[in-house]
Amino acid sequence: MVIPLSVHMLIRPLPKTEEAYWSLSSILHSIKSYSAKQIPKVMPHISTIWQPERYDHIVRDDRAFTAIWNYICQNPVKAKLANSPEHYPFLWQKS
């Protein structure tokens, strides 16, 4: 989900090989690298795309997943960008 000054994602890494998964750092590097090159093409007034730090968590069970998902969904409501998560156009869900 994208809101002003923030991006929230729940990511499940895919297998890289039969024995290993893509690392969180490689996934985020790919996302940040691509978007940092593409966003200025359509929004040239934006200079800095990403802050250097990130706040990541490992989701270990369904309870944690639900709590984090609810937190993400409520961000646009708390920021007064929508009356409900369903009405916010930049909240995407793919199972």
Image (cartoon, grey):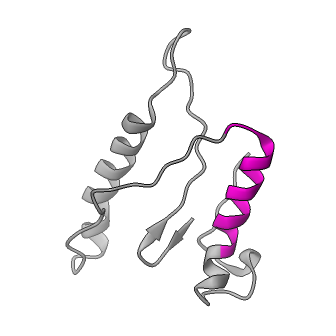
Closest to the observer, 77 or 41: 77
Bounds of the magenta span? Answer: 60-74
Whether 35 is among the magenta residues is: no
State whether residue 6 is above or below residue 11: below
Q: Residue at x 38, y 37 (%)?
A: 25
On the picture, is 12 further left or further right than 83? left
Residue 12 is situated, as x and y percent measured from the top left of the image, at 61, 37
Tally of numbered discs: 0
Q: Residue at x 41, y 75 (%)?
A: 5
Closest to the observer, 38 or 51: 51
Image quarter of residue 74: bottom right
Q: Residue at x 45, y 79 (%)?
A: 4
Residue 71 is situated, as x and y percent measured from the top left of the image, at 67, 66
Q: Which quadrant is home to the C terminus?
A: top right
Residue 47 is situated, as x and y percent measured from the top left of the image, at 20, 73
Q: Main secondary structure of the magenta part?
A: helix
On the picture, is 86 further left or further right than 25? right
State whether residue 83 is above or below residue 28: below
Q: Residue at x 72, y 75 (%)?
A: 85
State whether residue 12 is above or below residue 92: above
Q: Which quadrant is home to the N terminus?
A: bottom right
Residue 51 is situated, as x and y percent measured from the top left of the image, at 29, 63
Whether 63 is among the magenta residues is: yes
Closest to the observer, 72 or 48: 72
